[in-house]
Amino acid sequence: MKKPATKTALIPKMYCNLFGHDYEVTKKVTYHVKEYTCSHCKKQLTTNSNGSLIELTPKFREINAILERIHNTRMERSREKMLVSSIC
């Protein structure tokens, strides 16, 4: 019964081997850092500090989560400053 499951798993990988991956942005961490997933084989990538695409490992997941938290905090603080300055 496991044979059909492996055949269906091989088809997307074969497609990516022949035609290349079709990456879609799945998460915008910051303006410059994003996470990507291949729509066929589900391979996950992210951008590193140089802007290159690298495989999304647990280490980079943690780094991206921290970056996202810092980015959101700064953006919220910036919005609050703009609101206060527009009132004054």
Image (cartoon, helix red, strand yellow):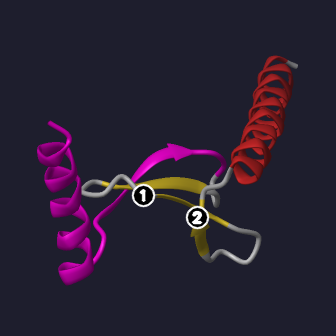
Front position in the image: 70 or 80: 70
The x, y position of residue 13, in whole percent, is: 26, 66
Split into 4 quadrants, where in the image is the N terminus?
top left
Q: Residues within 10 Å of mark 1 (few under 14, many from 20)?
A: some
Question: Mark 2 is on which residue type?
Answer: Glu
Q: Secondary structure at mark 1?
A: loop
Q: Please state if 8 lies on the left or on the right of 50 as rendered.
A: left
Q: What residue is at 79 percent from the left and 48 percent from the top?
A: 63
Vertical arrangement, residue 49 with respect to residue 86, above or below: below
Front position in the image: 41 or 32: 41
Front position in the image: 87 or 14: 14
How many marks do you count on the picture? 2
Q: Please state if 62 lies on the left or on the right of 42 as rendered.
A: right
What is the number of the mark on residue 43? 1
The x, y position of residue 82, in whole percent, is: 79, 30
Front position in the image: 26 or 40: 40
Q: What residue is at 23 percent from the left and 53 percent from the top?
A: 9
The x, y position of residue 6, in whole percent, is: 22, 51
Whether residue 17 appears in magenta in the rendering, the answer is: yes
Vertical arrangement, residue 55 with respect to residue 28, above or below: below
Q: What residue is at 81 percent from the left and 17 percent from the top?
A: 87
Q: Secondary structure at mark 2?
A: strand
Query: Disc 2 versus disc 1: distance between alpha carbons?
Result: 8 Å
Split into 4 quadrants, where in the image is the C terminus?
top right
Magenta-tinted stretch: 1-30
Mark 2 touches mark 1? (CB < 8 Å): yes
What is the number of the mark on residue 55? 2
Judged from this view, the residue extending furthest toward the front is 1
Question: Mark 1 is on which residue type?
Answer: Lys
Whether residue 4 appears in magenta in the rendering, the answer is: yes
Q: Quadrant of residue 23?
A: bottom left
Vertical arrangement, residue 24 with respect to residue 75, above or below: below
